Image (cartoon, rainbow, N blue to C red):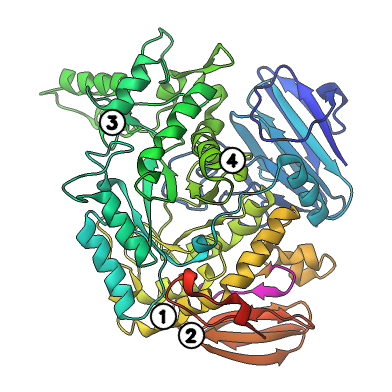
Amino acid sequence: MMTKYTSGTPIDTEAVVRRFDALPVADFPFAHRFDGDKFIFSFAMEDGDIVYGLGESPRGINKRGWVYESYCSDDPFHTETKQSLYAAHNFIIFGGSKAFGLFVDFPARIRWDLGYTRQDTAEITVDGADFDIYVINGGSPREIVREFRAAIGQSYIPPFWAFGYQQSRWSYHNKDAVNAVIEGYDAENIPLDCVYLDIDYMDHYKDFTVSEEAFPDFAAFVREKRAQGIHLIPIIDAGVKKEDGYSVYEEGKANGYFCKKADGSVFEGGVWPGVCAFPDFLDPKVREWFGAKYKTLTDMGIDGFWNDMNEPAIFYSADGLKKALDKAASLSGEDLDLGRFFNLKDTFLGLSNSQEDYSAIYHNVGGEQVNHQRVHNIYGANMTKAAGEYFEKEFGKGSILMFSRASYIGAHRSSGIWFGDNHSWWSHILLDLKMLPAANMCGFLYCGADLGGFNENATRDLVLRFLALGVFTPLMRNHSALGTRDQEGYRFENPGDFRDIIQVRYRLIPYLYETFVKASEQNDLIFRPLSFDYPDDPIARECETQLMLGEECMIAPVYEQNVKGRTVYLPEDMTFVKLSGERAEKREMQKGLHYVEIALNEVPLFIKKGKKIPLCKPAMRTRDLAPDEAEFI
């Protein structure tokens, strides 16, 4: 049963679609107190209790033992020391001696101390007095997830082709670069469905423009690629370049659609194009206006997008940069000692995503001027909502691929997410795996990480092992950063290994798509911790390197370098299947610990006793798959 408690006058985030009669927060059944301008909730934890959830966040499947923050943050260094990433997914489940779920519907900062200060206590600090908090009591963790998901609405289902293999890089800067990628994959007979266009496809990084020099007759180019079975997926950023004559900026300025400062002037911050204004996505009129701008590209045949930089990421504000430059000028010719030098250095390092700048932004929320810090966590979600509302109105559900970097619960109804700018680190294979079930709990089924890693230089074996996990994630996208090693599969020695891995994905697509749709329609998970299915098994309860997939399977990727396999725990008798290209090698295995050898061109999969899954013939494009001809293993 799900119960709602309300404090003050909350801002409607539209995260919950089911109506509840609210009780006063004074009736909340757990310890709580008001401390100045913050509300604090406390929960006792037994030794064996597990804490699940928080969607896209650092660390493990079991969130216990660390302190997290819900505050959408543009931070590409996803290390264990971090407390927040790009999303704010305020749902957790306490599992163990007692099982219950909590959703704190609050669009500003929340601190989750889950046994960090005291091992036996979870303390949630809400940075304000206006919020809704929901308690879900009764049943198993999986049943709690279903109850919560039913309340927040059905998850977005993308087009079938969005389950194909996708290649991205910052940046394929012109049509020749795009063609070279497609030709490279085709020459090695490696399947491919999508190529991404990062910021360089635009005219001087301006949203809803295309560089005529880089992509002459873009509409014809899109049609040409579609004829080849390739979808081009352009990026859209939150910042709108300040430029006279640029129609998006001119319209936004004339209609008062941009975020303001306290004095009513437009807030200006620097991003990729230079000085930008930021659409006030919390205003329904602005969402309708901005969403309709995607028509510029859909009219050219584009049917997929990724929204970026929408936390919002701000490199500097006009005011902040002026202060820093003035400070530097005042010190010209000075003999800077240790303290003065580092003070000046920190002034410039602190320009990006400054709390002072965020505090200077104001939104129109229902006719009221609201400071950005009160609604920070729903800014990016409302950008994506703007696009989703337009796409559904114009094309119907499930016709356009859409996913976003920043997100809040509720955005799951119109988009997926990717897990942001990760690194080519072995530890990030496991970080990807650990975020999958938590994202599912919060409604985000279409999700995945940048396979191979976005930042730094990838090694061949790392990319192959990352892809072997990505075979199972709904979003299977290889993405890398400017200045790093090229990591397209055809560029490495023996590209046949990459063909073997990616062909496995295409053989599994009908099964994965069916599992995805079922999870969306039944408010269920695609990926589950082993402890959800085997709560009384002590090894399963602590397992952080394997996941249940659907009702049939378990996945256990290799996540270490220079190894020929891994140890895997089977919580029941299973069939171990090694998939590679069109080959499927099966072996019956008994419950327990096993070391299994897995070559770089193999994908391990474990199928539960009495279950079968379909495998179809691989194809170069999803459009050429024949699901009806699949064989069961």
Marks 3 and 1: in contact by CB < 8 Å?
Answer: no
Q: Which residue is mark 1?
A: 499
Quick check: 152 left or right of 88?
A: right
Kind of residue indicated by mark 1 = Arg
Label 2 neighbour load within 10 Å: few <14, some 14-19, many 20+: many
Residues at marks 1 and 3, CA–CA distance in whole angstroms: 46 Å
Span shown in magenta: 549-559
- Disc nearer the start of the sequence (3/4): 3
Q: Which residue is mark 2?
A: 581
- Disc nearer the start of the sequence (2/3): 3
Q: Secondary structure at mark 3?
A: helix
309 versus 544 height, above or below = above
Q: Which residue is mark 4?
A: 411
Res. 409 image quadrant: top right
Q: Can residue 520 be seen from the camera position used here?
A: yes
Label 3 neighbour load within 10 Å: few <14, some 14-19, many 20+: some
Give 285 or 77, whichever is nearer the viewer: 285
Q: Which numbered mark, 1 or 3, is in the foreground of this view?
A: 1
Q: Which residue is mark 3?
A: 348
Q: Is residue 557 magenta?
A: yes
List x then y, in percent, for residue 415: 55, 46
335 versus 210 height, above or below = above
Q: Secondary structure at mark 2?
A: loop
List x then y, in percent, for residue 575: 70, 86
